[in-house]
Image: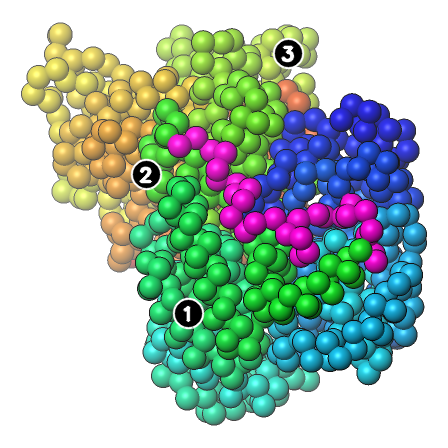
Amino acid sequence: MTDLEAELRKVVRGDVGFGATARALVTMDASNYRRVPLGVVAPRDADDVAAVLEVCRAHAVPVVPRGGGTSIAGQATGTGVVLDFTRHLNRLVSLDPESRTAVVQPGLVLDRLQEAAAPHGLRFGPDPSTHSRCTLGGMIGNNSCGAHSVAWGTTADSVRELDVVTARGRRLRLGRDWSGAPDGLRGLVDGELALLRTGFPELPRRISGYALDALLPENGADVARSFCGSEGTLGVLTEAVVDLVAAPPARALAVLGYAHETAAAEAAAGLLPYGPLTVEGMAADLVPSAVTLPRGGAWLFVETGGESPEEARARAERIVRAADAVDGVVVTDPAGQRALWRIREDASGTATRMPDGSEAWPGWEDCAVPPARLGPYLRDFRALLTEHGLRGTPYGHFGDGCIHVRIDFDLLTEAGIGRFRRFSEELADLVVAHGGSLSGEHGDGQARAELLPRMYGERMVGLFERAKEVWDPDGLLNPGMLVRPAPLDSGLRFSVLPREPVDVAFGYPADAGDFAAAVRRCVGVAKCRTAAATGPAVMCPSFRATGEEEHSTRGRARLLHEMLAGEVVTDGWRSTEVRDALDLCLSCKGCRSDCPVGVDMATYKAEFLHHHYAGRRRPMAHYTMGRLPVWLRWVARLRAARVVNALAGVGVLASVGKRLGGVAAEREIPRVAPQTLSAWWRRRPSAGADRPLVVLWPDTFTEHLSPAVGRAAVRVLEAAGLRVALPPTLRMRGRPVGDGRTRWAVPLLGAGRRGRVCCGLTYLSTGQLDRARTVLRTTLDLLEPVLAAGVPLVVLEPSCAAALRADLPELLHDDPRAAALAGQVLTFAEALEGLAPDWTPPRLDRPVTGQTHCHQHAVLGDAADRRLREAALLSGELSGGCCGLAGNFGFEKGHAEVSAACAEDQLLPAVRQAPEGAVVLADGFSCRTQLEQLAGVRGRHLAEVLAEGLDQGSVSN
């Protein structure tokens, strides 16, 4: 391997990686399979590709081209050298609106092509649900399709010419009329014309095998088309000329409800004569309960286009009238359509969990049958599942007869894997009996190639092998795929994971306490690799800042998987590879909500850091910022805020202090408030005792750094008719003094122990979980009277509210008080809405800008905030993303550049583009600090804005 790496580094101008991290990141795609490569090369151009092939051929080392790594059949993994095209060969070379063509490199993400084509009224027809991260090279390799294939076909239908380097270094330009055909291909076809004319099923989604019928003379002897779907086994694509289609100026979406999925499937083919753009099917199991859809247990999403909104709507309404549906509705609002399509696009992830939380896996992800046979096929498919004691929820491209499904295979035990094989063999026979294709979109790879003789027969499969030999006589390219395949039940990615649960700190309730099962959640659909966040989405800010796979949620999950496997990453919890990848994780928790399978990398990071630094010296930032509550309490006790602020303002002293404390030199130290929220509270009169009581949580940031937010919240809550108290500071040994309804309790000599409540956020984010447990248990002790009385806890800082609602019960999963506390936590807006429903907020009549806090988005939800803003006449939407400061993250040494890049992703542009006079809302202290330090803008908590409205008298009761 050393010689191979050295030779590659001599001849390749791109990146060569043979280290553990580079290899671990590409051991898997989105399939059930795992293959460990020797190394990864990111070529800069076709010359690099040719050089890699020459060196690898000399060493007899296989080569596997890889795009976005979202393949579901295993074809994007390999044991030799993996070519990663996403890093350099990812450009849109040109776009010609007149000829409606584009020249693209294989690593170009589909959405980038769509964005460039859109101003010309054009688009690339195929659009898989992974369009925000899949590459054109991967689409050509798999002959991908997507939801709009009923209108615009497969990728092969959109390909004109392909530039390819063969395994022996020949550079070919593939096209029609045998253009670019390697020596011997035409003779092979001419000798088997009868077989090629009769051996392929007629259906719109036949992706399995090689498309050798495209080489028939009546089909134009199209070498480029025949190359599509070859899964990197024939040659390496370096550039492509693709066709674009006219995009309808307006669209409407007819959503049709049916009693069950079979009824929807049987109806789908009947809608094709109406010329829809999509006919997508989905059952209730995959639809979030909060989504409002027409009556039914399954739905068809039928999109129509038109030159005007009225024309598109009229076509959709015609389909609703013609459909034999239980119920139907037409959606014309673009935001509403996007929300519905997100449900469909996330299905490849959400389907990996059954309704009871058990795991489900790909493997039979995209069989296709003639659309008219879809209903009978689904009935037989369901019967076969029942026969084998398996479960799955079909969905997908009903108009094309193509079904996606994740099945609850047991791929961990010998008996379960045996059942997987038997079911696969019987399902292949069932698909063939219905005139179908084993693959209707994602290719055969390792998952289905072994069963191709059942579909095509031995003679046709033999012809496939001969075609492979013509293109790649040395068997260099992606061996084990399509021809001479590896067994479908070998190399399963789960086989390397520990069989017994790993000893961990968090409870992982959704994964039965099994950390390996939590890591297995990442199935590789790679929604975290989206280069540009849209709408309220947060995940994954560090990937968008760096573009590096190891800084994506998927990349980190892959490294954790390999850490547990112990083959590539060999140091377990002490792994520097995992530590370095997690270093730029902002713990924003965006993946907890945005990842279709609910990967929670913030929790995994805390878990890892807890083990990684056990018994060892930590980074200095963990002792300074990680224990911020301790230091700030000492400042308050010593009444030293002014002294600390003065010292922080002295350049030399501040510089030395930041260097010693692990703080980024680029950062300013936030000022400590001279008076804490609690000190202010003790000096103010109490409200009437007959009002409903709430306990206001004095989080560290509000207490010591921005008490003005707390003061404003008290004003608003009291104006809404509530009585506010702060949490008890005395833990009683005997019968409690006070019940949580008083402003404070007078301590009796020897009666109890003083303390302060804390959510443990800074300890959690730095992985100091033992200390977090201690802090949180103290908090629970102090709050026992509050919990017993069922008094709501209003938490102003979203990150602290999220820690109490999610992290606390998961860390102290053995303490029932933790769940009780989590259930009593309310955000500021939730408290006003739920406890003062008749109160009318000030009428402010102003536009707003800013960003929904990432933890609010991921854990708490912002529906109540939206309604409160609307009631206060605060107009406009807040952006998504993460501010980039993220508690201690942006202050830590080495993080400043990434922190600023995260802010530039959505927050700062939103503020710059805001209308004049807009209120900049930022409920999180980190968000406000980031705005102030990077943009010189003052962000305000919603409580401050409403309190200002009270001062102006713009309120009615």
Say which element carries label 3.
helix
The residue indicated by pointer 1 is 381
Left or right: residue 889 versus residue 387 is right
Q: Is residue 108 left or right of residue 819?
A: right
- Amino acid type, residue under disc 1 in the picture: Phe
Residue type beneath disc 3: Arg
Find disc 2 in the rendering and name its residue. 512
Residue 205 to residue 273: above or below: above
Image mark for residue 659: 3
Residue 636 shows which numbered tag? none
Q: Looking at the image, is 443 positioned above or below residue 680?
A: below
Query: What residue lies at 27% left-to-right and 56% top-to-bottom?
Result: 837
Q: Is residue 477 magenta?
A: yes
Asked if one can make out residue 864 in the rendered structure from this viewpoint, the answer is yes
> Hey, what amino acid is under mark 2?
Ala
Q: Considering the whole magenta stretch, tell me its main secondary structure.
A: loop
Magenta segment: 470-499
